[in-house]
Each structure stands twice: as structure tokens, then as C-alpha cells.
Amino acid sequence: MERRRLLALSSLGLVGACGLEPGGRSRRTVTAWLMKDSASQGFLRRFTRAFERDHPDLRLDVRIQQWTGIGQKVQAALNADSGDGPDVIEVGNTQVPQYVEGDRLLDLTLESSLRWGGEGWLPGLREPGQLLSHQYGIPWYAANRVVVYRKDLFAQAGVKAVPRTREQWLDTSEKLNSRGNQGIYLAGQDWYTLAGFIWDEGGELADDGDGEGWRGTLDTPAALRGMDFYRQLQALGDGPADADEEHPPQAGVFAKGKVAQMVAVPGLARTVVQQNPSLKGQLGFFPVPGPTAARPGAVFTGGSDLVIPNNTRERDGAVAVVGALTGARWDTDLARTMNYVPNKKTLAGDVAGEEGLAAMAAGAAQGRATPSTPQWGAVEADNPIKAYMTKVLTGADPATEARQASRRITDILNRLG
């Protein structure tokens, strides 16, 4: 799952000391399922103490879940009649559509618009949490790709400033692609990076705009322009045409010392330095360039939303937990603690002191998510986009291959729809 791969860098029960308020009255328990490694134990302890202090009638029980098998577990909790399951659940931002089906999530549109300032949330988190303009998933935190680069190789090539446009990026990468170095390492099937280029051109991976069901749209002129830019950039290195960025892991390739740039989350730089300590202090970051210098390029936004099951018995308590976790105070605290992007563009300045995080936050303002349909997971499982990319990069006609891939995407979505 991309969200887990993008953000990955025992069950833990954080509960109050007792179930009674100081006056002897019972306290109501709100149970939250949060995912492993999304937040540190220290953050969860700080939040739990503060939340229970501010809500003396509530007790917060945080239960950490594993990503493996979580889909089935969440589906079972949402379908249960007992109401004994979790009151708040963290889900990957692109998972929300599959859980909305069947009226199983609480509609939080009113809270979002009147209390939580939902209009300011990052679109890559906000939009997947919506259905027919109703907000079910509340953005918590984000992460996205940036360009990780070698400062020393830039200097050796006479490159004095990082590129801010696509054309500058191509020129820079070409200069760097010399002296035995790869200007950029870009695997041939890195389709999330391709998606950003397609979005920048005004295209989509799939579309339901005609109201007659979802259809693949890799064959539109805009999407083809995005693929053409990918082809030009990918040629300025030796990334394999028939594999993605995990085969082999691009951090290991970068660590060998002959790559000037890669597209990755900033946290991958730590892995590079662990494998090659001589690169410590030599790595820098900048947002993926866009068509013009006016703004960074579009990027896929991974991250998490918080949802509330409709079968909760603690609606008000659950709403209070979601509101607190996603509010400015604790959302910024989490971003600083875990090197995430906060859920609002207006909070980006609060994490501007760290180069990689600042680059990620700048890109997140142009963040997008995969098509908002419960069936998109089946497309990723079969992934005709990867096969399409390999064929184009090895000389096949882009328009012909794009039509075939688009038909395959359409078939998958309609077959399962």
C-alpha cells in the first residue's frame, strides 16, 4: 500500500488512571484506533494527558493497529451492530472512499465548515475524504515526494541554484548526467511521480466527469504530455525501465554515490546516509518543479484522515478527539515530532525551519490523491499504468499504449463497480 510505504519511517493502550471523575462520577471512554508509527508514544502520552485534562468527563483509550490486515478489521468494526468497536479510526487518505459506502461513517461536514476550518485543509487529504461534497474523513497529516539532491555534485557541475521549472530541471539534470554520474535516478515504473506530471498538464489517471462511470484517461492529450516529460527526465539517468523505485530500493542506489537526484520523501535521506555516512551534510531538498516558477509541481499526497463510525456510542466524545487531534496545536506538534506536513497550508510556516520538511510542505500545497473511487485499489493491484510506462520507455508508441492502458483501467473499474 502506497500510503504505508510513503509514510513508514505491540499494542499500546494509553488510558486514564481511573474511570471516575474527581467527584465520583463515571467517565465515558472514547476508543481510538491509530496506526503503528503514525505518532510517537511520547506524542500520544502528551495528547492523552492534555485531552483528559480538558475533558474531565472523558477517558481516552488509544489502541495501536498494524497496517497489515487493517482493511478487513476496519470493515468488520464499521459493520458491527454492537457499537462496542472504536469511536475514532485513523485510515489512509485514499482508503476513505471504500469505507464511506453503505452510510457507515459519520458525516462531519457541519463540524468541518463551522468549527474546524475545513476550507484550508490540504486538497490531497480533504478531497479523498469527501463524497458528494460531504466530509467524512478529517485530514490529520500528510507526506509527499520532493527532490533529494547532492549539493556537492551540483557544485561540481556549476549548478548554483536548484531548478524551479520543468525546463530548468531538465537542463540541470542534463548537466549533472556526466562524469560517470546519473543526473537523476528515476525508475521506469514510478507511477506516482508520473501522476504529478499528468496533473500538472491538466490530465487525470481516470475520470467520472460524464456521469456514466469511471474511465481511464491516460490517452488524453494532457496525460500524454505528462508521460512525455517523464520520458525525457527518466532518460537523464540509468533507472530501470521495467521496475519501480523499490526494485531495487532507490535509497541503496543513491547511496552508492553516483546519483545526483532522486524523487522521494525526505525521510529517505536518512536511509541514504546510514548506508553511506560520507554523504552526511551533502544532501539537500527542493519541491518537485512545476511547469512554471509560480508554484511547485503537483505531487501525490499520502497521509491519514480520521473517521468516526456511524455505530459509535460516543459521538460527542469522538468528535472532540478528532477536533483536538486535527486542530492547529496538536497537528503542528505531530508534524514537528514525526517530520510530517501539517493538514493546512497555513501551518506550513510552523515547520519551515527544516529543509526537507519545508520542501515537502511547499509541494503538499499542490498535492493530489488517486481517483476517489472504492475500486481504485483493484487498479493498483493489477496496475496497467506500470506496464504502459515500461512500453513507452522502451520505444512503443505512447498513444497506442495509452489507449490500451486506459481501456484496461476502465474495465477494472466497471467490472468491480
Image: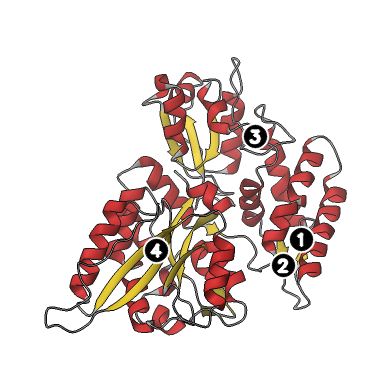
The answer for how far apart the CA atoms under marks 1 and 3 are is: 27 Å
Residue that carries the numbered disc 3 in the rendered image: 247
Answer yes or no: is residue 280 visible: yes
Label placed on residue 100: none
Label 3 is placed on what type of residue? His
Number of other residues with Cα within 10 Å of mark 2, as a class: few under 14, some 14 to 19, many 20 or more = some
**What's the residue at 69%, 41% (across, down)?**
189
Label 1 is placed on what type of residue? Thr
Q: Where residue 280 sits: x, y (%)?
A: 38, 25
Residue that carries the numbered disc 4 in the rendered image: 344
In front here: 241 or 177?
Answer: 241
Q: Quadrant of residue 417?
A: bottom right
Which of the two marks, 3 or 4, is nearer to us in this view? 3
- Badge 3 element: loop
Q: Where residue 281 sits: x, y (%)?
A: 36, 26
**What's the residue at 36%, 41% (across, down)?**
355
Q: Is residue 277 left or right of residue 56?
A: right
Label 4 is placed on what type of residue? Lys
Label placed on residue 207: 2
Q: Is residue 20 left or right of residue 172?
A: left
Answer yes or no: is residue 260 visible: no
Number of other residues with Cα within 10 Å of mark 3, as a class: few under 14, some 14 to 19, many 20 or more = few
Residue that carries the numbered disc 1 in the rendered image: 217
Disc on the earlier residue, 1 or 3: 1
Number of other residues with Cα within 10 Å of mark 4, as a class: few under 14, some 14 to 19, many 20 or more = many
Q: Is residue 52 left or right of residue 277?
A: left
Which of the two marks, 2 or 3, is nearer to us in this view? 3
Q: Disc 2 vs disc 1: Cβ atoms closer than 8 Å?
A: yes
Label 2 is placed on what type of residue? Asp
- Badge 4 element: loop
In front here: 308 or 114?
Answer: 308
The answer for how far apart the CA atoms under marks 3 and 4 are is: 33 Å
